[in-house]
Amino acid sequence: MDSESGPCYVWPGNPNWTLKKIYGLADTTRTALPATFSVSSDLKLAAITDNQCRVTLIDLHKGIALRFWKGCKEAQTCFVDADEGFAPAGRLPRRGSFMLMYLPYSNTLELWSLIHGPLLKSWSIDGPLRFVPSLAKSLCTYLKRFSVLAIIGNDNLLGLKFSLDLWFPHTKEASDFKRFASLRNWINSKAFKSCLHSDQINTVARLENEFQGFSLPDWFLKALWIVLTSKSSGLLDWISQKLANKDLLGTLTLSESQKCAFQKHLNVVRSLIAFYQSLSEAYERQSLQGAAPTPDSTNAFITPVASLFRQCVKASELPKLLPPSVFFRAAAHTRLFRPAATRGSQASKGQSYHKCAAYEAILGRAIFAPYFQGTVPAKSFLLLIDTAPIPFDYLLVLASRYLVTIRPIADLLQITQLTEVLYKRHPRKLALVFVELYQIILSSRNYACGLAICSALIGAAEEPSLHSQASSDVDDDVDTSPVTSPLQASRGDLQLRAEHLQDMVVFHHCLTAFRQSYSPPSWNARACSVRRILQSGPDYFTNEFARHLAPSRLKPSELVDIYRYFGGRNSPPCEKEFADHFHAMCQRLPLSFEVNRVLVCAAWRLVRQLASPWTRLGRAEKFSHLSRVADFLSNTSNAGHGLAFVVASQCHECPLPQLLKQHSTSLQSNDFTKPVNDAALLQEAMSLCQFFKEFRQVSIAANEGNLLLRDERWDSRQRLVCPGGELQESKETRPRTDSAFPLDKVAAGDGDAGPPFHALDAWFQFSVIHAAILALGLPDDEPARCPVHLLSAAQWEDCNGLHLPVWTHSVHNANQKSPPMSLKQRRRAFLDWLLRGLAGNANLRTEYPAFLSSAFSLASAWDLPTSAARLFYVVSLYENWADRDAEEVACILTVV
């Protein structure tokens, strides 16, 4: 069809899509072959094969043909991007574009350089080959290391990994590349290490000769960083002398602007070498004297939780200083030689934000580990870092990065004190970098060290002489205009964050004790960032503890007993360590952590697992989870029945119909006149009976108004603000709204209404009758012979939505007459038959105590005297010579 902008074509797969023709290549004698069109990753280039054995390279932006390959019959193409194998510090790795071409008639795979580059490499292939889409790499982590994947035949998977080094021999940099490759292979070999120890003079002379042969400064820097990052610490003095030589610039081809940048780069490298040597000397000098003593101190935010870190004592051995290869490798990937790569920008292609943060943590460890662990005295170390070639504000970032990645092997109070002293060193630099330090706290998953950083920032903000020192601490290259200290403006927010971090420390220590006592061995713990926890608000503690409680071995009744233990004088019903941590957590979070919400949230997580289409639970495990859901709901008090009713309604909507259908399908060929032989079917019926019983129970108090108390300090709507404005949130740090129990939604009454009580009552009565028939068979006594007449017609209408078993089909038979007695008499006769059967069956009496509870609840639902039913059960036990069981039941009735 035609339009105003030109001809349009309807897409065959979807009639609603139309393709507009932008440009075209006029060649009426050739036809493109299907499934031979390939596009580059940047969507700029495309290649297509025609029926005349020609491959055409097309510029998609300009609509022109750039290159042709002839004699390529039915060739397949694939674009490949390759990065530079090694890039010097201060420059992103270069990237090149290549194209793989498979020629099926010659079984040859060729690699071409784009756009007008030569043939770089070719391989002979045994069998037909087809390229795999790049999305297939996401199926396995191991496949991501390859540049392209292909299948040879139908059985073999071929993975190819390319580097930009294939392209350098065909450029003007070929001589420098050849010299660099030879130098890199020699330095990484074992012969170099042995020669360096045995004949260092000749080894240094050869290195001197190799460095003089470079003509381009980029390759000289690459060779320099290869030597710095190698495991050869004896070359630092030679490198420093080499870089100080003024004749070095004469051998390289440089412009005036390039000379300044090149000389600045070399000066930074020399300063780093001198700083590392000074740090190493201070470490060796102090290692002979032992660890430096630190005075005792107190902190308002650390002292309340200091008792939780009794296992974190000072290490008996001094930590090892990182080797120079690790130090310089980390320095090369940080912001010392180039600006920070921001997320989502073009500069972050070669180096992501997280990679830069990881190398900053490594460099921070190399610099500050002796300081925070007491290896080097604080006074001498602070004098040492004042002479470091790293800006002091960036040193604060490195120290904070290091702190949030370690566990406090030393005293947490000592770490806080040393950090506060470091922050007070140059107050103006701290004010400039405060926003980034605040972001480090929010992105941290180490809550203890995050609390140490936050407490140190508060201590620095409360320093009386902060403003006076900030006005005098000004460098020559810094703007001297007056700046309002963001620390003073954010001190209240920092104090609130410190209280939040205290809550996190107490809560996660309780979770650690809980996992050690009750969680299965295969449990995988997780730690969320501080930002995500603050965004989740007070519901985080409820959801996280429920996530641990749902799959654990702890029963809900035991958790309630632990919660009630603190008001009495009895011994704890669990291990004392967990009881103490649980008590401290309940005292610390009285409004954010409430047992009823935890029990309901644990039940909700089990319901979500049952309803998930990707669940791997078997049939027996599903009904076991349903019983555990009923157990959680049964231990909630009236204050939590509103939340429990919503969870039970969700369970009734999604997973319960499938479970009922599976259970009814298994009973189609069953003989109901006899007890069922399969114990699993009886267990399934008991699980359904328990669930309907608790569903009916929680619906009674569901409509009562219960105020949902919340902690104002943990308001999830509070903005995470700082002096630089509201912090930008990435997609990764936003909490998933579907992974937390909607407490606010349920409290506001926005949840589903759920089934009415008369329907729940009918479902419960039917489930007890059904379980009794499976356990004992259909009754033979005349009054209770027809169990279908135990429910009224209205109740059977309520049960029509359930998947009813075969024995209920007589309900719909209009010709069947009911027995000549009242409904209450039939129910009394059925209950007598059920209690006699339970008393006479030892297996049911010992293995299914919940059966008795359901029977007594059924008597209450039928308006029959429950006490009389219990006494009748005791008499039935005496009749069946179960005197001990009868006495135990009689004692329980006497206590009640």
Image (spheres, grey):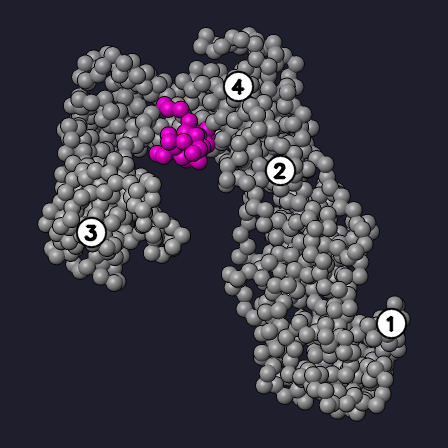
Identity of the residue drawn at 24% across and 38% down: 63
Considering only order in the chain, which callout, 1 or 3, is on the residue closer to the N terminus? 3
Identity of the residue drawn at 77% across and 75% down: 794
Q: Which residues are magenta?
A: 337-366
Q: Nearer the viewer, mark 2 or mark 1?
A: 2
Q: In the rendered structure, which amino acid carries the disc numbered 4? A: Leu
Q: CA distance from mark 3 to mark 4?
A: 61 Å
Q: Secondary structure at mark 2?
A: helix
Considering only order in the chain, which callout, 2 or 3, is on the residue closer to the N terminus? 3
Residue 227, can we see it? no
Of the numbered discs in the image, which one, if any, rests on residue 432?
4
Considering only order in the chain, which callout, 4 or 3, is on the residue closer to the N terminus? 3
Q: Secondary structure at mark 1?
A: helix
Of the numbered discs in the image, which one, if any, rests on residue 534?
2
Considering only order in the chain, which callout, 4 or 1, is on the residue closer to the N terminus? 4
Q: Quadrant of residue 221?
A: top left
